[in-house]
Image (tube, helix red, strand yellow):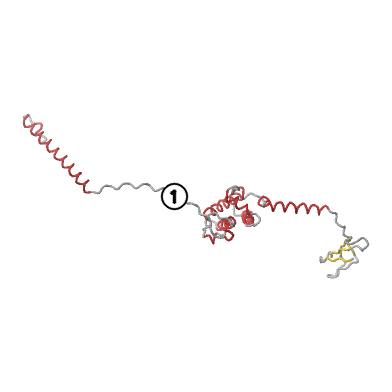
Amino acid sequence: MGKLRQNPNKDVARQASAIVLKWKQSVEAEKANRQKAKASASPAPAASPLPKPIMVATKRKFEGDPEKRKYTEDGVDVKRTSSQVRNNCIGLLYNGLAYRSTESVDFVIQRAVEVEDAAFKHFKSENKDYKDKIRSLFSNLKNKTNPELGKNVMSGEITPDRFVRMTSKQLMSEEQRKHDEELEKENMKKAQVPMAEKSISDTLECGNCKQKKVSYSQAQTRSADEPMTTFCECMNCGRRWKFS
């Protein structure tokens, strides 16, 4: 039929073109009918559901006895590194930070991991200094006279990097520091008081070891009309006694 459209006889060519055109129109109509039938047979696509709002997980406060908190009791997995030593230290820090705290389990373990990581980086290994520091931090966190230390670490006022570098004096509470300062002043006063000079006697005998290696000093401990008190110490066995 396609060749007949090029026939020299114009009438034949015209008829052939009309037949081909009608055939094409029939084919297109058939395709359209099939697509409509298919569309009507399949269910309409469901409307896309609205995206659910993103829920931000709230950190629930601890509701038990804060003075009895431990990672074992709180059900915390402290295996956060490939080292058992470091994991044990994380557990120890958790116990210290959780003591008297009502912060959530997730928040406490997060802080414990951060502090341990800062200590590990500071000491560069699991050496003795690293272990001693972790024990020191734990002891200070558990000190009942120093409740502010744990709170300051948890709140971020004391950062993990600063926490692991703090000296024993810096870790103390204000009350502890004042007590130590007063004690130091008292010791300085005592050191400035002249002590009675001790002499070695070759006549005094120790009743314990029977050696005559006795040092003694004398002081007026009663009224002036009373004899002086003699303080003795055996240089051999260390026994001490006094007499008037």
The quarter in which the C terminus is drawn is bottom right
- Near-viewer residue (179 or 122): 179
Query: Residue 175: x percent and y percent?
Result: 69, 52
Instruction: Return the residue found at the far front.
Output: 63
Query: Residue 61: x percent and y percent?
Result: 53, 55
In this rendering, position of residue 216 left or right of residue 56: right
The quarter in which the N terminus is drawn is top left
What amino acid is at disc 1?
Answer: Met
- Near-viewer residue (150 or 24): 150
- Near-viewer residue (218 or 61): 61
In this rendering, the answer to whether 17 lies above or below 60 is above
Query: Residue 89: x percent and y percent?
Result: 58, 56
In this rendering, position of residue 172 left or right of residue 13: right
- Near-viewer residue (40 or 193): 40
Q: Which residue is mark 1?
A: 55
Q: How many numbered dots are placed on residues in this image?
A: 1
Local SS, label 1: loop
- Res. 195 image quadrant: bottom right
Query: Residue 69: x percent and y percent?
Result: 57, 59
